[in-house]
Image (cartoon, rainbow, N blue to C red):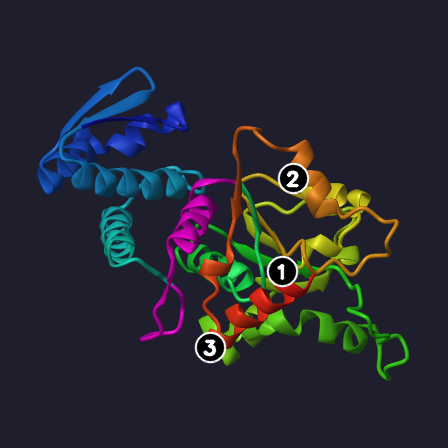
Amino acid sequence: MNLNIAIEQPHKKLALFGPADRNLRMLRDSFGIQVTARDDELRLSGPTDELQKAAAVLERLQKRLSRQDHLSAEDVSQAYREAQHSYDIKVAGAIDVYVRGHAVRAKTQGQQRYVDAMFNHDLTFCTGPAGTGKTYLAVAVAASLLKQGKARRLVLARPAVEAGERLGFLPGDLQQKVNPYLRPLFDALHDMIDIEQVKRFMMNDIIEVIPLAFMRGRTLNEAVIILDEAQNTTVSQMLMFLTRLGNDSKMIVTGDTSQIDLEDDVESGLIDAGHRLKGLPGIASVELEKTDIVRHRLVQSIVNAYERHD
């Protein structure tokens, strides 16, 4: 197999290659592949698995060079360790999150398509019924990217729309009033990351859990941004959210179009975006089915029963 990798910063080409092309020779010897430099591109040839590992090393080296002008021996060694660890996780089918001994992995083919889409696209839409892991897997992928240093921030947002209830008269300040809407996101976070670590991340603005309305006017760079319950956004809210996407960021939009809590005459921004953005390059759209439900076995039966009644 052959693989071409663009040199993202040609003016730092010598730093990437190392003294006397040491880093390229190390790639060749470590993975048993051929490495050729031509213009602003590296051409790799060899077994598929070894090429994937070599590409992961180069990705990490180039990312580090985006923040500094040279690579130390420790930088290179760390890139190899991280690439091997990432490959081992991928082979095992698990998502690398913070909590040791807690493997998070796709349990159905639909979920695996969803996970692959999130890792390989900057914008991913996922729709499906309750219990299919839309939010849970999105948070897992975001936590994994945060842990690997591929993102500097994690932003989780939800529209504050009541599901047939009125929370406006609850006591407390604004944050206390919106916390009930954000609780599912906190629950998923605490499954992936130690509670004390979550608190530290939130204090340092590495993790932010906010109502959708608080995102207006912002641009989010080097972040993973998740919009949960997106079926309850209006068209203008969805446009506002999607245009927050900054450089080196990923955006994940999840929702269940069968559970829209908007007024009857208000169009769902999630459904509208699905029509407008269909087929655009760089955007993935995954639809999970009832067969992807992984909650208690009764959840799938309940969903089926309600659909039959409707």
- Does 104 appear in magenta? yes
Q: Is residue 265 above or below residue 164?
A: above
Q: Position of residue 241 (x, y in %)?
A: 71, 46
- Which circle, 2 or 1, is nearer the viewer? 2
Q: Which of the marked residues, 3 or 1, is nearer the chain's N terminus?
A: 1
Q: Is residue 255 left or right of residue 283?
A: right
Vertical comparison of 15 with 119: above or below? above
Q: Is residue 246 visible?
A: yes
Q: Amino acid at mark 3?
A: Asp
The residue type indicated by label 2 comes to Gly
Q: Is residue 34 above or below residue 258?
A: above
Q: Quadrant of the N terminus?
A: top left
Q: Residues within 10 Å of mark 2 (few under 14, many from 20)?
A: some
Residue 296 visible to an observer of this rendering:
no
Helix, strand or loop at label 1? It is strand
* Residue receiving disc 2: 274
- Residue 219 has which mark? none
Q: Secondary structure beneath disc 3?
A: loop
Which residue was labeled with disc 3?
194
Q: Quadrant of the C terminus?
A: bottom right
Out of 174 and 59, give the one closest to the viewer.
174
* Residue 176 pos. (x, y %): 78, 78
Residue 265, percent from left and from top: 88, 49
Which residue is tagged 1?
156
